[in-house]
Amino acid sequence: MSIPRDNYVGEPDYPSPWTTKQPREGLRDLDEARVVSLSPDVCLTPVGSSAVPIPYPIVDYCGHDKDYTPSVRFTGKKAMVMRSCTTHVHGDAPGTKKGFKSGTVENICEPIGHAEQVRAEGSHVIRHLDRFWMNNRNTQGEAIFVRGTQTYAPPEDDDPVRGSLRSNGASSDEGRVISDASPEPLIMGAQYAQAAPATVPQTVPVPVRPAPVPRPPGQVIRPNVPQWNRPPPRPSIKVGKWVGRLGRFGRAMTGIGAFIEGMWPTSTAMPWYDEMPQDDFERVLFRKSRELQEQGVDVDDIQKWFQSERAENARRRRQQQVEERQQPQPLPQTEGARIDEEGSQRRCIVGSYEEIEPICRGNAHHIVPDMAYRLGRRPAKSEYNSTENRIPNAPTLNQGMSICLLSRQHGSDSEGLHGVLRQRLLDLASPVSGTAPMGAILAESIKVIEDIPDLPEECKALAAAMATGQVASKTGFAAPGRTKERPLPSGDAETVLRRGHY
């Protein structure tokens, strides 16, 4: 079977309670609203003469109601609140030896998440996407209930401006007289209607507004007013042009005026005509430069201002790119899962040994000991991906599902998890000494994790689910596994381990 990737290990980025972008439907007495497990419901199931933990995907329906609100109803149905629960789950009936954690099967579902500010009969309302305990807290699930995703636009901001005719009642109907003798309404420009063409276009073209221009930092943004790094140049009269305005005396001085005019040569390079703008800011800059030239501003002044503004815009774009690159990027999703505990700097990491060993600050611990899968000694680091000398369909050492533990949680030798687990595996009943069904080895391995006092419950549940899924998909629960570290398997033990079944 496959394990869902979204194992609940913390509050995900779901929409906040008060939002109109993604409405969250309130749960009520309807079978269309259901609770679906996010991680399997692990129940002990009879397999031959032994009971092994087997994961079951489960579901429950909100129509199986208990303690819903009789006086508050959504669309005529009783509402589900924090004190409510559903009566029994579906899908784990074969696990007659009861849940691995709860000791129950086909039991109730209780809500965990709820609306922060919406209550019914004094209790918080439960909604779509809220989390649940399932099978009497044996696993967790999520509510799924979507009736519609229609949203409504906010009211238009069309209140009259204070002091306008509309605010003073000019647009109201109060005081108007309905009569056949009322004068015809005045239509401005009606006397020119005959001069208009016979057909009037039904749609009026609307000019496209330019895209917003990026503003330099530290400047006040005013609507529709571009913000420049330096103010645009203004028209100025040069000496040569001024001499030409002196009338007859100026015409007599034409030669002198031409000489003086030549002292300020006009540049012929006009990039705002010859080049293409690169972004919205440059489009406005090019347009403004053309306007300044039409106003008679000296081309050299426009050129200097144009180049200065263009260089400043390029600097801002480079700075923006650097800031975007410096922003933290999300980590790529892996096959494992990471749990951030609230109020703690320590992270609980569950995944394959190859993935978590480099990032684990403590000890990367195989949940199911690698010894159970191999027939010889622990392989060298260069052989961590090898399947040689292992039981059929066994994961490699690097593929083994592991959990990151603190050094004090992991311990060492006989006082640590390995010492406790070795003794428990030796006590397992088996038809062949030195071996036991993988389901029984898995159950003891999970119990050792469960006994760690300061490990979060969510992390324990995730470790159990991930290890159970790997055993189920690789060797199966009935396949024999190794239980003795020394001596190495031989005789009947080696035979059944290599064969893969009893």
Image (cartoon, rainbow, N blue to C red):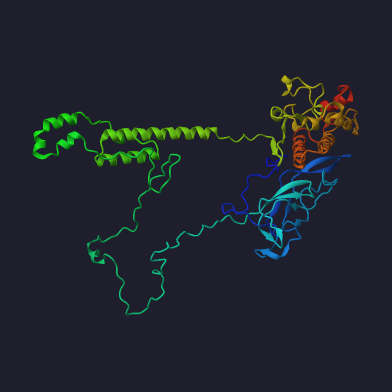
Taking 258 as reference, is 67 above or below it? below
Give left or right: position of 78 versus 289: right
Name the residue nearer the viewer: 4 or 9.
9
Q: Nearer the viewer, residue 197 or 236?
A: 236
The relative height of residue 57 versus residue 328 in the rendered view (above or below) is: below
Left or right: 11 as drawn, with respect to 149: right
Q: Is residue 42 above or below residue 196?
A: above
- Report the quarter where the C terminus lies: top right
Compare residues 166 and 47 and report the one nearer the observer.
166
Q: Nearer the viewer, residue 437 or 20?
A: 20
Tell me where residue 282 sits by quadrant.
top left
Asked whether residue 275 is in view, the answer is no
Decide if residue 156 is in sight here: yes
Number of marks in the rendered image: 0
Q: Residue 47: percent from the left, percent from the top? A: 85, 40
Residue at image point 41% right, 35% down: 313
Choose top left, top right, bottom left or bottom right for residue 276.
Answer: top left
Q: Quadrant of the N terminus?
A: top right
x then y, percent, for residue 357: 71, 28
Quarter where residue 466 is shown: top right
| Residue 81 at x, y percent in the picture | 71, 58
In percent of width and height, residue 348 lies at 72, 36
- Tell me: 15 left or right of 322: right
Residue 4 located left or right of residue 497: left
| Residue appearing at x 60%, y 36% in the figure | 330
